[in-house]
């Protein structure tokens, strides 16, 4: 029956989205049947992000009516420590609300206010290593401050669980998981940036490994009114750095490669990297490289590491060739890659990345991962991985030419 769903219910869906739409429809009744009783057996059909330590696993089931979360606490964790569940609804800030679950009591913090308030109509259960939470959307929207992002949820939800501090101690290492909203009709799998209209360009992602789009185009802040994309590496804890030093950032020093054949138009790497969260002037220059691609488009990567460039102006570059490394130069609060594409006349261009896998979770078994056949226009809040570039084929051996008269 599921094989027929894309054709019967989701007419018009592209082939790479059909499997995801079918999965949303298959998991919806499972999520709606969850019982908040401290048992985890009814969560078995849903995806669980696996961890280690104080938080061993997290699942999320966002239905039409409510948000449900399962947290599996580690065997050695203090059973009296409250569980914190941070929620990201796709708003401008990575955390839109925080729930504190103490036994069967739920408190909420809207993140812009340090005070926790009792949460009405929220149900929680704790039994051994299992903690379950259910919060009604209607109650969340009613309680949220005016203009809060949770009042206009996106098509997906991300939650991050960790144990709260006790007596001044440290919080545990978090674990994060994301899911599409299991609604009917299904939510849009991508919400395009529709304005302003501009001619798209196709290009490869100039990075290796799995990256998170922390800020997309035409978003409030530094990208307002511009087609630019900020990329960082985030792990399954949804953290971009594990300490305060530059080399504790997961993106620091990662390679930036050429997405195609082209010529180096500009190469600057003389400016120093600023400390994470450090001061400085907004006018501090950033290291950057600009490549004029043979496809008649131009790519710029900013905030490169000082002294990391491997190419020079007018040099020809090949696909996958190392250009430089991710740094923290210029106006930057932490190591990341700032990507911009333009046409050769300098007009801005929304990019459509080719041959990439896109998902909500940075793991190989992410059930929401897909490979858009026509390419993918970047959105904030997604993980993206360039598909492996094919190795160049070795030259075909040619038979030796034997001169005439030689045996």
Image (spheres, rainbow, N blue to C red):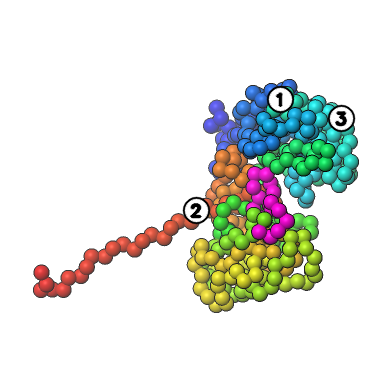
- Front position in the image: 94 or 79: 79
For the C terminus, the image quarter is bottom left
Front: mark 2 or 1: 1
CA gap between label 2 and label 1 equals 43 Å
Graded by Cα atoms within 10 Å as few (under 14), some (14 to 19) or many (20 or more), the crowding at tag 2 reads: few
SS majority, magenta: loop
User: Contact (CB < 8 A) between labels 3 and 1?
Assistant: no
Q: Residue 377 location, x and y as percent? A: 63, 54
Residue 50 seen in the figure: yes
Q: Which of the 4 image quadrants contains residue 6?
A: top right
Q: What is the magenta range?
A: 232-247
Q: Which of the 4 image quadrants contains residue 394?
A: bottom left
Q: Which residue is mark 2?
A: 388
Q: Which mark is residue 128?
A: 1
At a point 66% along the width and 64% down the height, the residue shown is 327
User: Contact (CB < 8 A) between labels 2 and 1?
Assistant: no
Q: Which of the 4 image quadrants contains residue 278?
A: bottom right
Q: Secondary structure at mark 1?
A: loop
CA gap between label 3 and label 2 equals 49 Å
Q: Residue 246 location, x and y as percent? A: 69, 60
Residue 293 magenta-highlighted: no
- Front position in the image: 6 or 160: 160
Q: Earlier in the sequence, mark 2 or mark 1?
A: 1
Residue 235 magenta-highlighted: yes
CA gap between label 3 and label 1 equals 24 Å
Q: Residue 208 location, x and y as percent? A: 56, 56
Q: Which mark is residue 60?
A: none
Q: Secondary structure at mark 3?
A: loop
42 over 202 or under it: above or below:
above
Q: Which residue is mark 3?
A: 120
């Amino acid at each position: 029956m599921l094989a027929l769903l894309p054709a019967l219910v989701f007419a018009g869906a592209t082939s790479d989205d059909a499997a995801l739409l079918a999965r949303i429809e298959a998991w919806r009744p499972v999520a709606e049947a969850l019982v908040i009783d401290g048992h985890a057996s009814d969560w078995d059909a849903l995806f669980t992000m696996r961890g280690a330590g104080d938080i061993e696993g997290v699942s999320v089931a966002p239905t039409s009516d409510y948000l449900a979360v399962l947290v599996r606490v580690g065997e050695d964790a203090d059973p009296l420590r409250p569980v914190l569940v941070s929620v990201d609804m796709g708003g401008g800030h990575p955390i839109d609300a925080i729930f504190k679950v103490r036994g069967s009591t739920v408190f909420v913090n809207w993140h812009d206010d340090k005070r926790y308030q009792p949460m009405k109509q929220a149900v929680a259960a704790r039994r051994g290593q299992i903690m379950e939470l259910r919060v009604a959307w209607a109650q969340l929207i009613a309680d949220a401050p005016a203009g809060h992002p949770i009042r206009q949820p996106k098509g997906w939800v991300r939650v991050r669980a960790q144990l709260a501090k006790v007596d001044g101690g440290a919080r545990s290492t978090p674990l994060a998981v994301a899911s599409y909203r299991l609604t009917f009709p299904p939510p849009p799998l991508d919400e395009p940036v529709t304005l302003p209209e501009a001619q798209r360009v196709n290009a490869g992602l100039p990075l290796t490994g799995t990256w998170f789009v922390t800020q997309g185009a035409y978003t409030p802040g530094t990208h307002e009114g511009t087609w630019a994309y900020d990329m960082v590496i985030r792990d399954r804890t949804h953290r971009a750095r594990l300490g305060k030093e530059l080399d504790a950032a997961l993106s620091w020093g990662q390679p930036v490669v050429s997405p195609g054949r082209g010529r180096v138009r500009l190469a600057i790497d003389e400016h120093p990297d600023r400390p994470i969260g450090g001061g400085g002037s907004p006018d501090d220059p950033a290291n950057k490289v600009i490549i004029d691609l043979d496809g008649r488009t131009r790519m710029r990567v900013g905030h490169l590491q000082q002294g990391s460039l491997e190419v020079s102006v007018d040099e020809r570059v090949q696909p996958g060739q190392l250009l430089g490394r991710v740094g923290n130069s210029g106006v930057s609060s932490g190591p990341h890659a700032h990507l911009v594409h333009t046409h050769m006349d300098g007009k801005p261009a929304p990019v459509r990345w080719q041959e990439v896998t896109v998902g909500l979770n940075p793991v190989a078994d992410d059930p929401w991962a897909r490979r858009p056949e026509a390419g993918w226009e970047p959105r904030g809040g997604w993980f993206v991985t360039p598909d492996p570039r094919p190795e160049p084929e070795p030259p075909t051996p040619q038979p030796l030419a034997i001169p005439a008269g030689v045996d």
